[in-house]
Amino acid sequence: MSNKLLIEEIKARAKSLTELLSPCILCPHMCAVDRAGGELGECGVGFGATIASAVPHFGEEPEISGKRGSGTIFFSGCNLHCCYCQNSQISQNPRPIKGDSVKEIVDAMISLKARGCHNINWVTPSHIAPFAVLALAIARSQGMDLPIVYNSSGYDGLECLKLLDGIVDIYLADLRYSDDDCAAEFSLAPNYVSASRAAVLEMARQVGTDNPIGADGTLERGLIIRLLVLPNDLSGVADTLYFIKENLGTSVRIALMAQYFPAYKASNELLLSRPTSFREYSKIVDLADKMGFSNALIQEHASAEFYRPNFEKEKEPFEDIKHFIKRG
Ligand code: SF4
């Protein structure tokens, strides 16, 4: 069962997180806009959060999806602007905040628990964390006792993460680049490398890197680092693997992702206008193997043909998925 703080403590954390919104220093963009006063920063989201989709999802890593699915809540907007974003329908055109954001999140969590999901999976929460945490305090008081998965691009502020210590049970985070020029050009996040590496180390400090799988086949606590292999080595995954090995060892869970395809504006970028080749992906899988990573998940190279969500179908955005494969 998840590591649960007292409800009053979770509410106090939500209050401290809310204070980071005006001026907004919630994420490493540090826009310093007054979100409570209606100003918008890089993420384009004001004072609240909008749910784009809340569904059981079976395409996450097996220790997250299990047999009954992960209770994913996809939030509208994002603090990154990746030109290849597969979720651009919801991430790059934030939906307006209407009604009571917190109540909507509470209702979604309660409903996903009732549908039998193993956990609640906040997808892209970095810019709306205060509202998700306040909703969690209320949901916990209503008996929602599932573990919380924080599923982010890795571009998270340390101050924000420290306030999530003991609230988040499982971190599912990207380390998407090892070169800031690439991060600036393709995701508009010039300090991504140092910010995401510091974030992942803080996540590991909180939840550890070597947690066992529970009786139902899912993680109740832990960290999974996602490494998306971009074409033409733009994500620099080899360098990231060396960083992980040096700082967290080789038993940390990693997911090597082959599912890149040129979505959103990527077909206009010469170096991103094709899927990652089999050779490019295999090279990374072999390197992780040689380096001794013992908890690596891999994807079939054909995954790029499948993982293409359509958020116009809010209740079923993921029709075609390919499951991860355990190495070894
Ligand atoms: S959460 Fe949004 S407004 Fe706040 S610093 Fe990040 S991008 Fe800027």
Image (cartoon, rainbow, N blue to C red):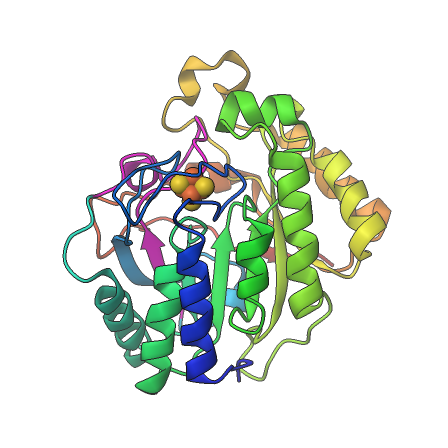
Query: Is residue 294 rendered magenta in the image?
Result: no
Q: Residue 77: horizontal and vertical position, in percent?
A: 33, 42
The image shows residue 92, relative to residue 222, as above or below, that is above
Residue at the image position 53 percent from the left and 56 percent from the top: 160
Query: Is residue 78 rendered magenta in the image?
Result: yes
Answer with the quarter of the image where residue 142 lies. bottom left
Residue at the image position 69 percent from the left and 73 percent from the top: 211
Answer with the quarter of the image where residue 161 lies. bottom right
The image shows residue 4, relative to residue 172, as above or below, that is below
Q: What's drawn in magenta, residue-wise?
A: 69-95
Seen from the viewer's position, the closer of residues 77 and 6 is 6
Q: Residue 17: horizontal and vertical position, in percent?
A: 45, 60
Residue at the image position 29 percent from the left and 41 percent from the top: 90
The image shows residue 316, relative to residue 218, as above or below, that is above
Q: Is residue 324 visible?
A: no
Q: Residue 33: horizontal and vertical position, in percent?
A: 38, 38
Residue at the image position 44 percent from the left and 39 percent from the top: 32
Q: Quadrant of ligand 1?
A: top left
